[in-house]
Image (cartoon, helix red, strand yellow):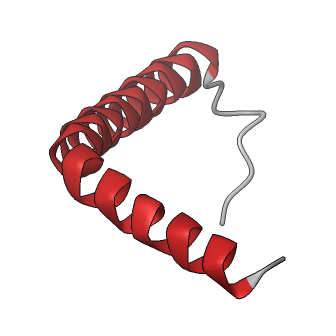
Amino acid sequence: MKPELIEILRMRWQRLRIYRRPHWLVMRSCFIKLDSSALIAVTRSRSQQKATNYVQSLAKPN
């Protein structure tokens, strides 16, 4: 690539990054909350499955 083109692309990327930063921060926050909620839901579900399927004679001691 020509040096001029590289400079234009770099400047354009910096401009886009500045304008879109608030948008990406909000999206990141949403994804973190979703990930956290999903992890909590899976943990609860797994605990319920363990409690439902627990049989003393089949349980292996740690």
Residue drawn at (61%, 25%) of the image: 54
Is residue 32 rendered to the left or right of residue 7? left
12 or 60, which lies in front? 12
Q: Quadrant of residue 39?
A: top left
Is residue 45 rendered to the left or right of residue 31? right
Q: Is residue 5 above or below residue 7?
A: above
47 or 14, which lies in front? 14
Q: Is residue 19 above or below residue 9?
A: above
The image position of residue 37, as x and y in percent, is 30, 29
Residue drawn at (66%, 25%) of the image: 55
Quadrant of the image containing the C terminus: bottom right
Point out the residue furthest to the top here: 52
Q: Is residue 27 above or below residue 54?
A: below
Is residue 26 rendered to the left or right of residue 51? left
Quadrant of the image containing the N terminus: bottom right
The image position of residue 60, as x and y in percent, is 74, 51
The total of numbered circles placed on residues is 0
Is residue 9 rendered to the left or right of residue 21? right
Point out the residue furthest to the right here: 1
Point out the residue furthest to the bottom here: 3
Residue drawn at (63%, 79%) of the image: 4
The image position of residue 16, as x and y in percent, is 35, 52
Q: Is residue 22 above or below residue 6?
A: above
32 or 25, which lies in front? 25
The image position of residue 21, as x and y in percent, is 23, 52
Residue drawn at (25%, 32%) of the image: 30
